[in-house]
Image (tube, helix red, strand yellow):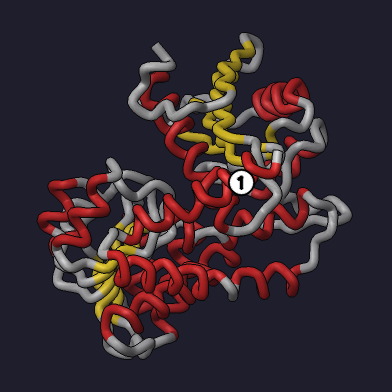
Amino acid sequence: MYFEHVEFDSHEKILFIHDAVSNLRAIIAIHDTRLGPALGGTRFWNYADSADALGDALRLSKGMTYKNALAGLPFGGGKAVVLIDPAQGKSPALLRAYAEALNQLDGQFITGEDVGMTVADVDQIRVHTPFIAGSSTTRAASGDPSRFTAEGVYRCLLETAEVAFGSMDLNGARIGVQGLGAVGWKLAEKLYKAGATLLVSDLDRTKTRRAVDVFNAIETAPEWIMRQEMDIFAPCGLGRILSDESVAALKAKAVAGAANNQLSHPGVDQFLSQRGILYAPDFVINAGGVLNVAAEAQGDYDCEKVMKQVHRIPKRLRSIFDRSKATGRSTGAIADVLAQEILHQVNKAA
């Protein structure tokens, strides 16, 4: 069943974890460890069912392999998802049980904050395991990674604007921000300060109403934002937002956002290219957070050093744009090939 799963792609290890006392139900997917131990976040989410959770873990873990490779990190790719009952929430017992599951892997998987997780959760888990980063209490604590992710995405959005429109000037540009979580909000703040007109959507209307007040944004229903006239669409919520249907309706000239795994399937990237929509591959431009967490995991955390690494991400993106233009291949396909080349070099050296 699992080997035939549509999202399975030579994953090295998949663990299903259950603790009856705390009602922990989790899946840890380790995709590739050729570059080093797997590094990736843990997502706490109310999944429709375990099959949905498994697909998310498999898809996201592969994305982490490629993200870490292109970011130049000595880590492989992995991801964990925890199926949360909204009525139960994240109890101390559940977080401890999850920490014990990480201990059983003995460093094969190092995790950090993702959707549905907070620095406070990381701190609680960190009490019981060393295999988590992004805490606020350790000697090399890196804390909330969202500002690094937002900074990298913002700078890559500027790079995307220059390629798409010939200028990094966002004054008056219409930009749609879908998802106003920790990263999406910080990105919106940067875009507002740059003079952009923001169209915003989120499943939580309190966030969009606040954005209207703070950023003079235009509130848009989640199901309609991709149909609005805009220059750049920045998906910053959950993944798979770009499908054949949504791209056919998309009224933007470029896509550059923080969400992981934005494409519902690889062919969507080619469809974007055919429509003349410039796509900034998500696992390239949203690497700021993992760069921050990786620095803590390596025990040598320096905020300024991490930010310098984040500021180099746009150069990597520009090389992908240039190679795409030279070869006629889509930007997502180019990014995949570059990551695979790095992994193949490890095989040759072994």
Q: Is residue 190 above or below residue 5?
A: below
- Neighbor class of circle 1 (other Cα within 10 Å; few <14, some 14-19, many 20+) is many
**Whole-percent x, y for residue 132 in the image:** 73, 40
Q: How many marks?
A: 1
Q: Mark 1 points at which residue?
A: 113
At x 57% / y 45%, what residue is drawn?
A: 343
**Whole-percent x, y for residue 32 in the image:** 58, 35
**Whole-percent x, y for residue 199 in the image:** 26, 70
Quadrant of the snapshot with the N terminus: top left
**Foreground of the two, 332 or 253:** 332
Q: Which amino acid does the dot numbered 1 rest on?
A: Glu
**Whole-percent x, y for residue 20 in the image:** 62, 9
At x 76% / y 32%, what residue is drawn?
A: 107
**Foreground of the two, 190 or 217:** 190
Q: Is residue 46 above or below residue 126?
A: above
Kindly state the secondary structure of the residue where label 1 is placed: loop
Quadrant of the snapshot with the C terminus: top right
Lateral position of residue 118 relative to residue 3, left or right: right
Quadrant for residue 51, please give it. Answer: top left
At x 79% / y 56%, what residue is drawn?
A: 141
Q: In this view, does 336 lie above or below 209?
A: above
Is residue 281 visible to the viewer in this orientation of the structure?
Answer: yes
Is residue 92 visible to the viewer in this orientation of the structure?
Answer: no
Q: Is residue 176 above or below residue 70?
A: below
At x 41% / y 79%, what residue is drawn?
A: 158
Quadrant for residue 327, please give it. Answer: bottom left
Which residue occupies the extreme front position in the image? 348
Lateral position of residue 1 relative to residue 142, left or right: left
